[in-house]
C-alpha cells in the first residue's frame, strides 16, 4: 500500500523495549519525508526515553492507570492536530480504542491472525500475514507495507549532543572500563539468582579489570537484589538503580560491556551498539533477543542443548537457574577477544 501522509500517528504505548523497536520505524518515516510530523502515543516511562528524539515531533501521553482520562486526552490531541495516517503497532483493546479515537482516514494495523481483542476492527488497512519472527522485524513489516525503505536501520537513541556534558558528569565518578549489569526485570522468571550476580561482580573486577555498575529500576525485587550484592560482593560495585532513562542511555553508551536480563536496557544496548551479554531463559531469544547483533554473546537457557526451537511466544519457566557464573564468564572471555576496545 502506498500512502501519501505528512501527518503520522504512532500507537505503541507499552514497554521500553517495544519503544526501542519502534525507533527504526519512526526514523525511516522521517528519513523518507523530513517534513513529516510524527505524533506518538506513549506511556510515561517509555515517553521519558523517547522525548527529544529528532524523529518524534510530539508525544501524546497515555497513563494506563487513568485509562478513561487518557483516552479523553488522546481524543483532544488528535482533534487539535489531526493525522493522515495512523500506524497501530499494538494488538490490544486499549490500543484499538486509541486508534478509534484518532480519527485518521487511514489506520494500518496487524492482520487478523495476529491482532488480539478484535483489534483489527479498529483499523482500515492491515499488513499481510507473516510467519512468526523477531519483534523488531514485525514492526519493520509496516514500513514494507507502506513502501518505506527500512534500511539502513537507525535508532538514533543518543546520547544527543545536548546530553554529552551530562553524560560526562554522570560517568566521571564511576571510573573506567565500565561493565553495566542490568539486574532486574518486570517478571521474576526472567531474573537471575542474586548470589550469581555477586560472583560475576567479583570476577569482572578481579579477572578482567572491569568496573561493575548495577543498573535497573526501583522495584522491591531490584532493591533487594541491590542490597544483597552490595553487602556480599568483595568489590562493592557502584549502583545507578532508578536513574532517569536518558541517564541510563548515557551509562550504557559509555560501557565497555553490558550484561543484561531480558528487559528494555538489553535492546537499548543493542541500539547503542554496545556489546551485550544477554541472559535469557523465560522468553524466546529468537523472538525478543538481541536483534542482529551479539548473538555470539547470548547465554541461552531457553533452549535445551542442540535444540532448534521455533519462534513462538511460549514461555519456559524455571530456566534462568540453569545459567551459571562460568557460563557468563565464558562469554566475557569471548567479548574480550572479539569486542574489547582499548580505553580512550
Image (cartoon, rainbow, N blue to C red):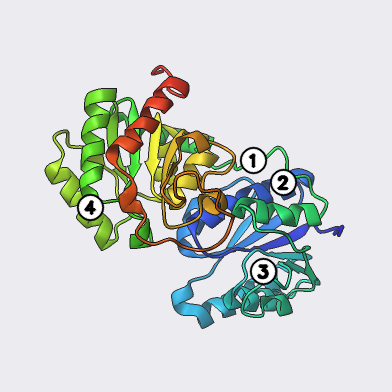
The residue shown at (62%, 67%) is 90
Q: Is residue 75 visible?
A: no
From the top left corner, tell me how far across and down residue 81 is, in percent. Answer: 70, 67
- Is 225 or 29 nearer to us in this picture? 225
**CA neighbours of label 2 inside 10 A, class few (<14), some (14 to 19), many (20+):** many
From the image, tell me which residue sits under label 4: 225
- Which quarter of the figure has residue 230? top left
From the image, tell me which residue sits under label 3: 114
From the image, tell me which residue sits under label 1: 154
**CA neighbours of label 1 inside 10 A, class few (<14), some (14 to 19), many (20+):** some
Q: Are marks 2 and 3 in contact (CB under 8 Å)?
A: no
Q: Residue furthest bottom?
A: 68
Mark earlier in primary sequence (3, 1): 3
Give the Cα distance between marks 3 and 1: 26 Å
Frontmost of labels 2 and 3 is: 3
Q: Circle 2 sits in a helix, a strand or a loop, which is it? A: helix
Q: Circle 4 sits in a helix, a strand or a loop, which is it? A: helix
Q: Circle 1 sits in a helix, a strand or a loop, which is it? A: loop
The correct choice, above or below, for 25 with respect to 162 in the image is below
Give the Cα distance between marks 2 and 1: 8 Å
From the image, tell me which residue sits under label 2: 28
Frontmost of labels 4 and 2 is: 4
Mark earlier in primary sequence (4, 3): 3
Amino acid at each position: 500500500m502506498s500512502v501519501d501522509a505528512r501527518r503520522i500517528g504512532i500507537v505503541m504505548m507499552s514497554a521500553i523495549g517495544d519503544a526501542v523497536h519502534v525507533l527504526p520505524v519512526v526514523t525511516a518515516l522521517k528519513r523518507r519525508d523530513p517534513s513529516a510530523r510524527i505524533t506518538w502515543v506513549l506511556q510515561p516511562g517509555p515517553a521519558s526515553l523517547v522525548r527529544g528524539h529528532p524523529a518524534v515531533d510530539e508525544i501524546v501521553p497515555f497513563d494506563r492507570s487513568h485509562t478513561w482520562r487518557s483516552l479523553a486526552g488522546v481524543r483532544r490531541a488528535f482533534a487539535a492536530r489531526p493525522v493522515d495516517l495512523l500506524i497501530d503497532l499494538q494488538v490490544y483493546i486499549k490500543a484499538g480504542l486509541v486508534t478509534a479515537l484518532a480519527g485518521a482516514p487511514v489506520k494500518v494495523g496487524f492482520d487478523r491472525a495476529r491482532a488480539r481483542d478484535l483489534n483489527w476492527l479498529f483499523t482500515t488497512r492491515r499488513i499481510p500475514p507473516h510467519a512468526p519472527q523477531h519483534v523488531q522485524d514485525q514492526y519493520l513489516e509496516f514500513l514494507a507495507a507502506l513502501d518505506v525503505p527500512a534500511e539502513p536501520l537507525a535508532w538514533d537513541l543518543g546520547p544527543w549532543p545536548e546530553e554529552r556534558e551530562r553524560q560526562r558528569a554522570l560517568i566521571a565518578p564511576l571510573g573506567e572500563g565500565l561493565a553495566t549489569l542490568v539486574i532486574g526485570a518486570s517478571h521474576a522468571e526472567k531474573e537471575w539468582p542474586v548470589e550469581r550476580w555477586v560472583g560475576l561482580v567479583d570476577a569482572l573486577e578481579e579477572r578482567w579489570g572491569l568496573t561493575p555498575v548495577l543498573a535497573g529500576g526501583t522495584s522491591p525485587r531490584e532493591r533487594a537484589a541491590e542490597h544483597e550484592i552490595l553487602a556480599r560482593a568483595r568489590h562493592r560495585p557502584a549502583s545507578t538503580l532508578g536513574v532517569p532513562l536518558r541517564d541510563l542511555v548515557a551509562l550504557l553508551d559509555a560501557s565497555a560491556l553490558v550484561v543484561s536480563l531480558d528487559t528494555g536496557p538489553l535492546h537499548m544496548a543493542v541500539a547503542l551498539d554496545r556489546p551485550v551479554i544477554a541472559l535469557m531463559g523465560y522468553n524466546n531469544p529468537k523472538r525478543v533477543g538481541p536483534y542482529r547483533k551479539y548473538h555470539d554473546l547470548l547465554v541461552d537457557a531457553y533452549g535445551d542443548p542442540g535444540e532448534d526451537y521455533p519462534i513462538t511466544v511460549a514461555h519456559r519457566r524455571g530456566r534462568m537457574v540453569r545459567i551459571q557464573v562460568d557460563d557468563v564468564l565464558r562469554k566475557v572471555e569471548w567479548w574480550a577477544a572479539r569486542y574489547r576496545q582499548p580505553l580512550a
